[in-house]
Image (cartoon, rainbow, N blue to C red):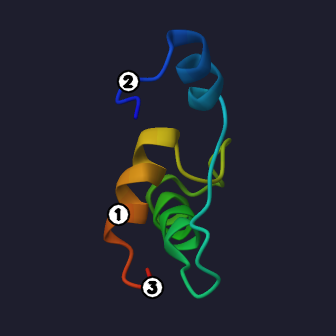
């Protein structure tokens, strides 16, 4: 099993946004609400960056 992604793949993944695959989870929605409250506007990018999505998926309370 590979532990480190190739830099080209990593660059592509860093440009994308991800959401938790668990239907009940609203983690990304909560983050958007916090950003709106903090800045007063919607963030340009909605969703989690690759590394944040991986970390969230490991700790999601809706994980089965």
**Residue at far top of view:** 7
- Residue at point 49%, 72% (across, down): 27
Is the Cβ of the residue at disc 1 closer than 8 Å to that at disc 2?
A: no
Give the numbered dot on residue 62.
3
Dividing the picture into quadrants, the one containing residue 63 is bottom left
Q: Earlier in the sequence, mark 2 or mark 3?
A: 2
Vertical order, 24 against 51 (above or below): below
Residue 5 coordinates in the image, percent (x, y)? 46, 23
Please tell me the numbered disc located at residue 58: 1
Q: CB of mark 2 within 8 Å of CB of mark 3?
A: no
Q: Position of residue 35 (x, y in %)?
A: 50, 58
Q: In this view, does 1 lie to the left or right of 49?
A: left
Question: Of helix, strand and loop, which one carries label 1?
Answer: helix
Res 6 label? none
Q: Left of 55 or right of it: where is 33?
A: right
Residue that carries the numbered disc 2 in the rendered image: 4
Q: Distance between the residues labelled 2 and 3?
A: 27 Å
Gap between marks 1 and 3, in whole Å? 10 Å
Q: Is mark 3 on a helix, strand or loop?
A: loop
Vertical arrangement, residue 52 with respect to residue 6, above or below:
below
Q: Residue at x 35, y 54 (%)?
A: 55
């Amino acid at each position: 099993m590979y532990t480190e992604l190739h830099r080209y793949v990593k660059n592509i993944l860093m440009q994308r946004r991800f959401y938790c695959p668990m239907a009940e989870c609203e983690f990304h929605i909560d983050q958007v609400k916090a950003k709106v409250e903090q800045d007063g506007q919607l963030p340009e990018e909605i969703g989690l960056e690759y590394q944040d999505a991986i970390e969230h998926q490991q700790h999601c309370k809706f994980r089965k």
